[in-house]
C-alpha cells in the first residue's frame, strides 16, 4: 500500500485505512494461542521505525512454522528488547527497518545489539532500510533476510525444528549469499 501511495495510485487516507485494517487483522491472528513447544522469536521495529505490516506479517508466518512469535511493536528500544529477551527463552530476534538509517546510527545500533542481545540469541534483520548494510550486518553475525522463507531455510539448516538450542548466530552466516 505504501508503494501505491508513493506512486500516487491511492490517497494517503486510503493507504492509512487499508493499513489499519491489515494491521488489526494481523494482530488478531497473533492473539490466538501460540504453538506449544516451539522456539521463541521476538519481532520488533527498530527505534524510529513505525512501519508495522511487514514485521507483523513475519510474526504471523513464523507462527505458521511452529514458532512462538511475539511482536513487540514499532519504535522499540534495544533496552526493551533486552528485557523481553531475559523474560522469554528466545532463540531469535527479528528486527525490521523500513527506512535506511544513517550509517552512524546503524553502527550505534550494532554496538547495542552486540552488547545487549548477542550472544544470548540469534539476530536477523529485514526490511529495505537494512538492505544497503547487508554485508556490514553479516560482519556482526546478523543475517539480512528478505522473506520469511529465509527463516524457514535457516530453521531447516540448523536443525532448529528438532532442537531450539541448536540455533546460534554463527549457524546462519555461512548460508547467506
Image (cartoon, rainbow, N blue to C red):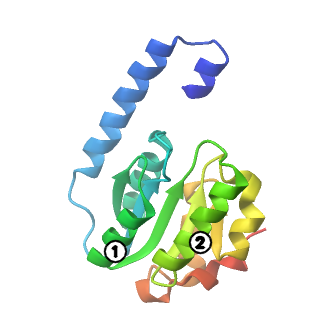
Q: Residue at x 32, y 79 (%)?
A: 89
Query: Pointers 2 and 1 in contact (CB under 8 A)?
Result: no
Image location (x, y in percent) of residue 48: 50, 45
Q: How many marks?
A: 2
Quadrant of the rendering where the N terminus is positioned: top right
In the displayed structure, does residue 19 sit left or right of residue 110?
left
Distance between the Cα atoms at labels 2 and 1? 29 Å
Q: Nearer the viewer, mark 2 or mark 1?
A: 2
Disc 1 crowd rating (10 Å Cα; few below 14, some 14-19, many 20+) is some
Residue picked out by circle 2: 111
In the displayed structure, does residue 93 sit left or right of residue 86?
right
Regarding residue 163, the answer to whether it shows in the image is no
Disc 2 crowd rating (10 Å Cα; few below 14, some 14-19, many 20+) is few
Regarding residue 26, the answer to whether it shows in the image is yes
Image location (x, y in percent) of residue 36: 25, 72
Numbered badge on residue 74: none
Classify residue 27 by image quadrant.
top left
In-front residue for pair 107/161: 107
Please say if 137 is above or below 46.
Answer: below
Which of disc 1 and disc 2 is earlier in sequence?
A: 1
Element class at badge 2: helix
Quadrant of the rendering where the C terminus is positioned: bottom right
Q: Residue at x 43, y 55 (%)?
A: 44
Please say if 7 is above or below 47.
Answer: above
Image location (x, y in percent) of residue 162: 43, 85
Element class at badge 1: loop
Residue picked out by circle 1: 38
Q: Residue at x 20, y 59 (%)?
A: 33
Image location (x, y in percent) of residue 88: 29, 75
Amino acid at each position: 500500500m505504501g508503494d501505491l501511495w508513493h506512486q500516487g495510485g491511492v490517497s494517503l487516507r486510503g493507504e492509512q485505512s487499508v493499513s489499519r485494517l491489515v494491521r488489526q487483522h494481523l494482530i488478531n491472528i497473533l492473539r490466538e494461542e501460540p504453538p506449544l513447544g516451539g522456539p521463541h522469536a521476538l519481532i520488533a521495529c527498530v527505534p524510529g521505525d513505525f512501519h508495522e505490516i511487514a514485521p507483523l506479517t513475519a510474526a504471523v508466518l513464523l507462527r505458521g512454522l511452529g514458532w512462538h512469535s511475539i511482536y513487540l511493536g514499532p519504535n522499540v528500544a534495544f533496552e526493551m528488547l533486552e528485557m523481553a529477551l531475559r523474560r522469554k527463552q528466545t532463540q531469535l530476534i527479528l528486527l525490521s527497518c523500513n527506512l535506511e538509517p544513517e550509517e552512524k546510527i546503524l553502527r550505534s545500533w550494532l554496538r547495542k545489539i552486540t552488547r545487549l542481545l548477542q550472544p544470548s540469541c540469534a539476530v536477523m534483520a529485514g526490511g529495505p532500510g537494512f538492505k544497503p548494510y547487508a554485508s556490514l550486518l553479516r560482519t556482526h553475525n546478523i543475517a539480512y533476510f528478505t522473506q520469511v522463507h529465509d527463516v524457514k531455510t535457516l530453521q531447516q539448516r540448523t536443525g532448529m525444528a528438532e532442537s531450539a538450542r541448536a540455533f546460534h548466530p554463527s549457524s546462519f552466516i555461512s548460508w547467506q549469499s
